[in-house]
Image (tube, helix red, strand yellow):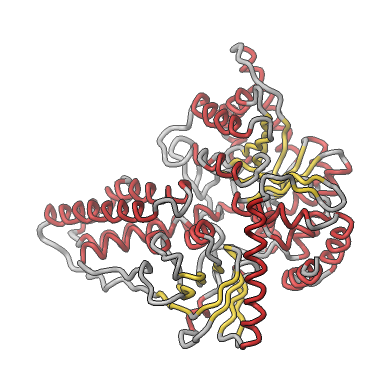
Amino acid sequence: MKKLKGFGASRGIAIAPPLFYLPQLPPISDETITDIDHEILRFDHAIKEVEIQIDSIQQNLGNQISKKDAEVFDAHRLMLHDPLFYDEIVKIIRDKSLNAPKAIQIVSDKICQTFESMEDDYFRQRASDIIDIRNQLIHTLLGTSQPRLSSLDRKSIVVAEELFPSDTAQLDASKVMGIVTARGGATSHAAIFARSLGIPAVVGVGDKLLDHQSISMLIIDGELGDVILNPTEETIIAYTARKEKEENSSKHAKLECKKPAITKDEKVVEIVANIGQIGEAEEALELGAEGVGLLRTEFLYLDRENAPTEDEQYEIYHQIAEVFGKHPVVIRTLDIGGDKRLPYISQLPEENPFLGVRGLRLCLLQPELLKCQLRAILRAAVGHNLKIMFPMVSTVNEIKQARQLLEEAKYELTDRQVAFGDVEIGIMIEIPSAALISDHLSLYVDFFSIGTNDLTQYTLAVDRTNHLVQNLADAFHPAVLRLIDRTIKSAHQSGRWVGLCGELAGEILAAPILLGLHLDEFSMSKASIPSIKQIIRSLSVKTCEGIAQQALLLDDSQSVREYVKSQIDGL
């Protein structure tokens, strides 16, 4: 028996034989061609064939996954005709007389490198969309077939280096008991589809996972990220009992999801959602969200030639606010940097964009862009409970500048005789320096929201895209927990409230720690809401205070996880 460690991406336990899914592209020739127009026609025909394949995948999916998660295939269809993709491939065929498969490979690799260099995990994972499209086009052009996961002989746990959208969309949920991948993160397609389909998944285990193709049985724990190879009979019996208990608990959590999260000692805890598209608002509400703790607004700015207008933004913010009524909606201002180029603003190349001009830093250099967004939010706040949150803040002076621009936006609306509402102002705490001076920062804002994804990366000096050190990027690390503790204490001493909108907020094992540190608001992906509400109802703040203080004293992330689990298993 051997245990490997990855990231728990979709809760649940799976026990089944492994199915190693390791498809390979056929060899691609460097051969040049003489009939360039014919080669471009072949490329155009391949695009039409892939569009037919995408239509077929979407039809087969039906209602198995949410509309939001299925939108990836609409994006694939658009990518096929994107000038950065299509025009570049045609240019290479014409200029270099290369065959279409080789041209596709060259352009795809270049675009993937761009995506993979981005700081935002969501956009890094989108490189797999390009690879998926590349594979489909090349197979179509070469007349080869891709292996599929739609018709398995037996119930299995799929083991892969990485799963692409066309792979995950064709999973037979009656046969695929779980998913394990060497690469990928919480926002990878394998993770997203697994959560939608309710399949346990562990991702980012590392390439060592693929060295064990002779194993006969596998257990995965989608909460803890454990992967057990060739488990003993005793281990199988123990995990089978846990699996049955967790499945019954999950069913109950969904039935109770719209009830408030109130601890045993009667503390009411606000549970809200992280969303990044308008379509996610109603889905989050249905799963028990009591508002929005993080509305990502980047979708309004990307993939377009001009900045969104004030009216365009107002309409989107207003629609989302209408869904949630009087519940709070926290809107994060544009969070973008040198790793994501916007054609309508001036961005100088940066050697290390992760530590450069991004978030609020960039917006302060583009004051009209920021004021346009602030005016739209202020207008949508009429009759709604909207809040403004600035990202990537590291100094008091940045907040002062942002507040000055907000006052200018109010003055401009007043001058136009346009009504606007009152809004609370907050900042994200996602840089260690901000956490360390949170007592000073709290004097200039109404609330903090702790972004543990970036806070972890910056605190532990770990690049989450580097699979060699991915396992070190763990928000349960005591260093990260101590910064969270310091931030909450600073805020409360100034009479401010604190939310947390990183992935940590949706972790069951993190709930006792965060409750014990007196976090006011948990903001998470909508799928995590029922189970987090359920665990909070089973806890008391007094008990959690002891758990949290002990966790702060431990040596490492694994010790924290094991300790918390030992404390709540009997509750």
- In the image, residue 128 above or below residue 491: below
Quarter occupied by residue 459: bottom right
Most foreground residue, 77 or 433: 77
Q: Residue at x 60, y 31 (%)?
A: 321
Q: Residue at x 46, y 70 (%)?
A: 176
- In the visual, does 488 lie left or right of 389? right
Q: Is residue 394 visible?
A: no
Task: Say left or right for 212 vs 405.
Answer: left
The C terminus lies in which quarter of the figure?
bottom right
Q: Give the answer, above or below, for where 405 lies relative to 164.
A: above
- Quadrant housing residue 222: bottom right
Q: Give the quarter of the image for residue 531.
A: bottom right
Image coordinates of residue 44 in percent, x first then y, are 20, 51
Residue 268 shown left or right of residue 172 in the figure = right
- Number of numbered discs present? 0
Foreground: 379 or 371? 379
Residue 391, given in percent of the width and then of the height, sits at 65, 43
Q: Residue at x 60, y 79 (%)?
A: 4
Does the image show residue 543?
yes
Residue 375 or residue 227, whichever sits in front = 227
> Where is the N terminus found, in terms of image quarters?
bottom right
In percent of width and height, residue 225 lies at 62, 70
- Which residue in the rendered view is the most extreme toward the left? 35
Q: Is residue 38 left or right of residue 365?
A: left
Residue 142, image x, y percentages: 21, 67
